[in-house]
Amino acid sequence: MNSELIGMAYCRFHNDKTPSMAVYENFKGHYSWYSFYCFGCSASGRIPKREVASWLAGCALMSSGNREEREVKAQDIWRGTERLHDDPEHEEPSTFLHDRFITIEHANKCGIRYHAEYNALVWQGRRTDGGAQEMQVRFISPGGGQKKILTYPVPTEKDIYPLHAVMPWSFFGAGYRTLIVSESFLDGVALNLHTGCYVFTTLSSNFNQRHVGIINMIASKHGYTQIVLAYDMDEAGLKAETHMARFLLALNYKVIKMSQVLTDTKLCFILKPYHRVYVEAVRGVSCNTK
């Protein structure tokens, strides 16, 4: 048997800071297959042929290049996306979204697109300085569902602006006087759909006072008096929730922390089986202020 290294990728089985997973094409006679080995955590196994591009995509998207090159690459990726459909060709992304309590119709309304080559969902967020939109890619393939890549522009040490995205009232328009703040874009889409509330998502557990300023501006404009913090109940999410609550309480908002409503950390939003429970709990505390 002969093997040929075809690329390095970010490992999907540990918190990889640099590409440490080798992807190989293996040959035996007329037969070939793909495999991986991580030099960081020793994970290994086979990769289905149709998923090789998505396994290597993270490395390609994070490759070096100036801002203009990254922007061109992001635009090329965006042009390669398509609207989602409930049909056999989109069965995998449809299942991925349905498992997260999101309908295909609402995903399309919130600007979620599908890239077939990468087998990934793609969406855009806005920098908190009001600058250009940036793009995130979330791979669907097994083991890579949590991978999110920021494609452009490249933040510098002096110019780090966390992303944010805003989803309006659901299209059935409940009009509750509650603003929900979520950590993840997909969580925000699910909450927007099932509560009818305006949702602001920080797109990570990393936030700064710019986020608070935008939240305050939105809440003041629309008359929101209650803010629900629906962060993941892991260490990073709980820390972000605590900091955000301190800022918002100083601005005299009524703040509800979901970690105090649902104290069972198993209900962490990132765990698929508990998405419905979490969404329904947020709906319960959000839909009591008209």
Image: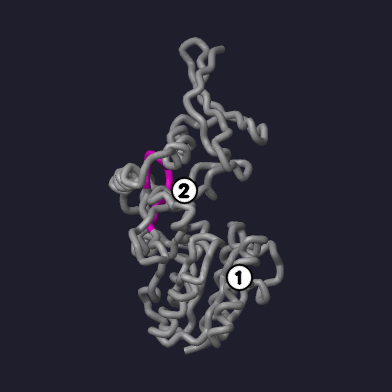
Please state, as top left, top right, bottom left or bottom right, where the N terminus lies in the image.
top right
Asked if 30 appears above or below 130 in the picture, the reply is above
Residue at 53%, 85% in the rendered image: 251
What type is the residue that disc 1 sits on?
Answer: Glu
User: Which residues are drawn in magenta?
Assistant: 115-124
Residue at 54%, 42% in the rendered image: 142
Residue at 57%, 81% in the rendered image: 285
Residue picked out by circle 1? 241
Asked if 98 appears above or below 261 in the picture, the reply is above
Residue at 47%, 41% in the rendered image: 58
Please indicate whether residue 24 sits to the left or right of residue 123 in the image.
Answer: right
What type is the residue that disc 2 sits on?
Answer: Ile
Magenta: main secondary structure equals strand
Q: Name, please, the residue furthest toward the front.
A: 158
Of residues 109 and 101, the one nearer the viewer is: 109
Label 1 SS: helix
Place of residue 139 in the rendered image (x, y in percent of width and height, measured from the top left): 47, 46
Q: Quadrant of residue 57?
A: top left
Asked if 64 appears above or below 177 in the picture, the reply is above
Please indicate whether residue 88 sits to the left or right of residue 51 in the image.
Answer: left
Residue picked out by circle 2? 149
